[in-house]
Structures are given as structure tokens and as C-alpha cells.
């Protein structure tokens, strides 16, 4: 029994001193960090080495490329004035949305069997709602379609939207002539009526801060004016009708329809007398002479 315990202890000591256990190891106690804008963010990184007591520590940010945050025992660029290191843990002061992203902590221990270890930390900076941009036309014609737009591009997580008319929240229903998309911020009218006129504003909100609203804008609904195009089309149709009638009259005259009717009317109103008979003068003289 004692022999078995001795063998187990020997094996455990051998495994603990093997490169598998004594290589550099790097980890993070909090791999995902969420903080509000303008607060501090702590990116934790813990490591353990086999032999090297002074390993090289680097922090990098991953994006389209790789950007050094901490290199050669100092911060680079914009991070120099608002970051600090404690061991391998990185702290940002007054973070903004631009600081969101994936960071990598790398520890290099050249004297260890496995000299490189790394851990990844994701930072998400939460941003409260901003005043949204609202697109409301000043006027629209009765019966036309209309879409109002509202957008807050800065809030994180993305904002949801709500429209108000005359300071009353609009709640779409089957009876209403409009529909609202709370994620896109649109308010769509299928056919505008006079009762849709009023003051419109949009409100953006998320879980981080208080809602924000744009300034209310006046929407007027007006009747359609007499369309000039319709007038021109009507005048053109009238002229075409007159031209068509003239062409019909000319064709009728060329085919003789009008002349024949006129001739028939003149025959009924006047009949000339027949010509007198032609007499033989010589015959008349002989007859007269015989009588004498």
C-alpha cells in the first residue's frame, strides 16, 4: 500500500514538473466586458510562467488589421494618455464607442517550454439614446402615400422608435390608415386624409439611458390643385374632335354626297317649260298662196 502511494506521489511530481504544466498560461477572468460610455473599462488578463520571471506583455486590438495598444512596455498613440497597466490587466479611462472591439492579451516567456500564451477580451461600450433625426414633409396632398422617417445611429444597443402626433403616442391598429416599424423608425400612411394633419415627432429609446425626442414638425394635408396636364389633354381632345369633323365633311363632299342632295332639292323647286315646236316656213307660204 505504501509502495502504491509512493509511486502515485512520484508520478504527480513528475507531471507537475513536465512542460505541459510549467509552460506559460494566459487567461482572463472576464472575457466579455460591457460598460457605459465615458466610464472606465477593465480588461483583465492573468498569466503564469514556468521559469521566466519577466515575460513580455503586449495588448493588441483586432479589426480590419491589428493595432498595438501596449507594446515594448508603453502605450501607443491615443491610448498613452488614458490607459494604465497593472500586471497584465489593462484599464481604459473614459471609453467611447470607438473603443468597442476585440482585444488580445499576449504574454511571451522566452525561457519557458511553450513561450507564448494569449487570451481574448471583448469590450462593448454602451451608448444611451441620442436625439434622432426626423424627416417630416411640410405638406402632402390628400390621398397620396407618405412615409415619415426617424433614425438614431449612435445608440448602443440600437434604439427602438415611437411616433407621436400632437404629443399623443400613435398606436397602429387594423382600423388605422398607417403602420409603424419600431426597429426602423418609419411611420407609413397608405392614403393621407385631412385628419392626419398635425405636429409629428419621434422618440428613440434603449436600455442604457433616458429616451430622446426630435423637435415636433408640422404636417399639412392639402387638396390637389386643378391639374394643368388634365386641362391641356382636354383641350387637345377637343381640337382633335373638331379636326375629325372637318375631315369627315371634306371626304363627304369629295364623294359627292352633299352635291347630289343639293341637286335633288333644286329639281323639286323649278321645272323649265318645254321648247316651242319648229315650223316649216315654205310649207306655210304655199298654203297661203293656194287660198288666195
Image (cartoon, rainbow, N blue to C red):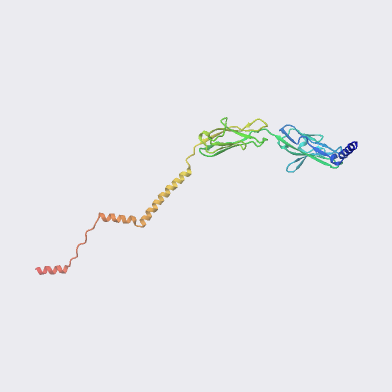
Of all residues shown, which one is farthest toward the front?
Answer: 1
Image quarter of the C terminus: bottom left
Q: Of residues 267 and 124, which is closer to you in this image? A: 124
Q: Quadrant of residue 148?
A: top right
Q: Can you give x and y, in whole percent of width and height, for residue 228 in the image?
A: 48, 43
Q: Can you give x and y, in whole percent of width and height, for residue 198 in the image?
A: 54, 32
Q: Of residues 54 and 202, which is closer to you in this image? A: 54
Q: Can you give x and y, in whole percent of width and height, for residue 269 in the image?
A: 25, 54
Q: Is residue 183 left or right of residue 16?
A: left
Q: Can you give x and y, in whole percent of width and height, for residue 244 in the image?
A: 41, 51
Q: Is residue 226 left or right of residue 41?
A: left
Q: Residue at x 82, y 41 (%)?
A: 116
Image quarter of the N terminus: top right
**Residue 285 visible in the picture:** yes
Q: Quadrant of residue 87?
A: top right
Q: Quadrant of residue 41?
A: top right
Amino acid at each position: 500500500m505504501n509502495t502504491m502511494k509512493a509511486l502515485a506521489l512520484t508520478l504527480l511530481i513528475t507531471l507537475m514538473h513536465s512542460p505541459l504544466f510549467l509552460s506559460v498560461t494566459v487567461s482572463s477572468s472576464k472575457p466579455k466586458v460591457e460598460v457605459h460610455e465615458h466610464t472606465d473599462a477593465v480588461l483583465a488578463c492573468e498569466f503564469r510562467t514556468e521559469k521566466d520571471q519577466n515575460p513580455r506583455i503586449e495588448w493588441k486590438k483586432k479589426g480590419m488589421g491589428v493595432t498595438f495598444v501596449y507594446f515594448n512596455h508603453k502605450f501607443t498613440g491615443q491610448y498613452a494618455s488614458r490607459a494604465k497597466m497593472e500586471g497584465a490587466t489593462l484599464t481604459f479611462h473614459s471609453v467611447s464607442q470607438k473603443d468597442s472591439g476585440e482585444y488580445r492579451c499576449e504574454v511571451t516567456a522566452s525561457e519557458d517550454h511553450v513561450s507564448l500564451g494569449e487570451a481574448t477580451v471583448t469590450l462593448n461600450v454602451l451608448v444611451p439614446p441620442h436625439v434622432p433625426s426626423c424627416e417630416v414633409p411640410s405638406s402632402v396632398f390628400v390621398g397620396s402615400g407618405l412615409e415619415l422617417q426617424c433614425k438614431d445611429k449612435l445608440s448602443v444597443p440600437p434604439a427602438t422608435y415611437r411616433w407621436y402626433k400632437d404629443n399623443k403616442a400613435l398606436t397602429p391598429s387594423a382600423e388605422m390608415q398607417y403602420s409603424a416599424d419600431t426597429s426602423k423608425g418609419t411611420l407609413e400612411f397608405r392614403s393621407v386624409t385631412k385628419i392626419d394633419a398635425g405636429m409629428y415627432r419621434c422618440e428613440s429609446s434603449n436600455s442604457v439611458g433616458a429616451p430622446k425626442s426630435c423637435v415636433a414638425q408640422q404636417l399639412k394635408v392639402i387638396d390637389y390643385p386643378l391639374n394643368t396636364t388634365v386641362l391641356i389633354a382636354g383641350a387637345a381632345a377637343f381640337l382633335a374632335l373638331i379636326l375629325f369633323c372637318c375631315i369627315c365633311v371634306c371626304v363627304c363632299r369629295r364623294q359627292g354626297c352633299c352635291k347630289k342632295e343639293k341637286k335633288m332639292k333644286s329639281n323639286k323647286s323649278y321645272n323649265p317649260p318645254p321648247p316651242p315646236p319648229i315650223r316649216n316656213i315654205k310649207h306655210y307660204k304655199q298654203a297661203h298662196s293656194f287660198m288666195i
